[in-house]
Image (tube, coloured by chain):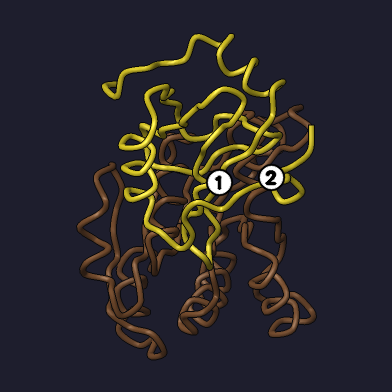
Amino acid sequence: MTCVEDLDKEVILQGSSFKESREYVEAGFTEIYYVDPGFRLFEKHIIGIPPIAIGMDHDFIVFPFTKPCYGTFLLKVEDAEEAKRLRSLKLNTKKGR
Amino acid sequence: MINNSGNNMNEQKEKNEVILFLGCPEVPVQMGISLYLSYILVKKGYSVTVAANPSVIKLARVSDPERHYMGRMIDLDHCIGDLAEKKISFDTAIAFAHNDAGITYATTIRYLHASRLILVIIGRNAEDLKKLVDFQCEMVVEKTVHNPVELKKKLDEVFL
């Protein structure tokens, strides 16, 4: 597993607010998992405002990645192993916490 | 209290541990006021750690080459990881925010640690950013980019 910076990724949104990134995932995906801040994904702890929405489409994982100077990016990464791990965790699929 | 080893946390706790979380340095007042805060807190007997992104750490090292004001500095994202894994702890966190990302980081810090959290919101959009905060913390809000005077007064009220 590599860290986020080294991943082969597609940037779906950049410089967005965290809220915008969540809304994009909720509007564009049917398979969504909600995680808490600090959740480990691709060897990185997610920075975010709970509930943090992660979108899934087959082996593609769409998730927010926040940088202090550049705002929140929404990244799309294809990784069968990580997708399988996420699905196996039986994460929350409802927005309510 | 910072304890990367996970051992002897009580033995190491000699004084209140404060951690400053510094985000993007593009609002100049952040660097100046954080140097001042670190100075004041150390003078009052606190143990101070600064968690910051690489740009801020470089600025601090150049601004304070002999570390008279800023002592221990650690990488911001590494610190968040250590918080998530319960490897570090502290008594008070002071987080700076001047954009949405700063509020997002502060929310994460709040979620991961139950200590006293003081959120310092600065920059031209300070009042709008304040509206995004829906977690428990103490807030110091000052619409300033360069001028530290009013912000200093507010922080002095908290710590002096």
Q: Which residue is mark 2?
A: A4
Name the residue rendered at 45%, 58% in the picture. B95
Q: Who comes first in sequence, dot 2 or dot 1?
A: 2
User: What SS does tag 2 mark?
Assistant: helix
For the C terminus of chain B, which image quadrant? bottom left
- Mark toward the viewer: 2 or 1: 1
Q: Residue B53's x, y, as percent?
A: 64, 63
Q: Residue at x 66, y 34 (%)?
A: A78
Mark number, residue A75: 1
User: In the displayed structure, would residue B49 be above or below residue A54?
Assistant: below
The span from disc 2 to disc 1 (Cα, nearest Å) is 9 Å
Q: Is residue A47 above or below residue B128?
A: above
Q: Left or right? Give the position of B10 relative to B97.
A: right
Task: Determine the colour of chain B.
Answer: brown
> Residues at marks 2 and 1, common chain?
yes
Question: What colour has chain A?
Answer: yellow
Q: Position of residue B151 (x, y in %)?
A: 34, 78
All told, the count of numbered labels is 2
Image coords of residue A26 (percent x, y): 33, 34
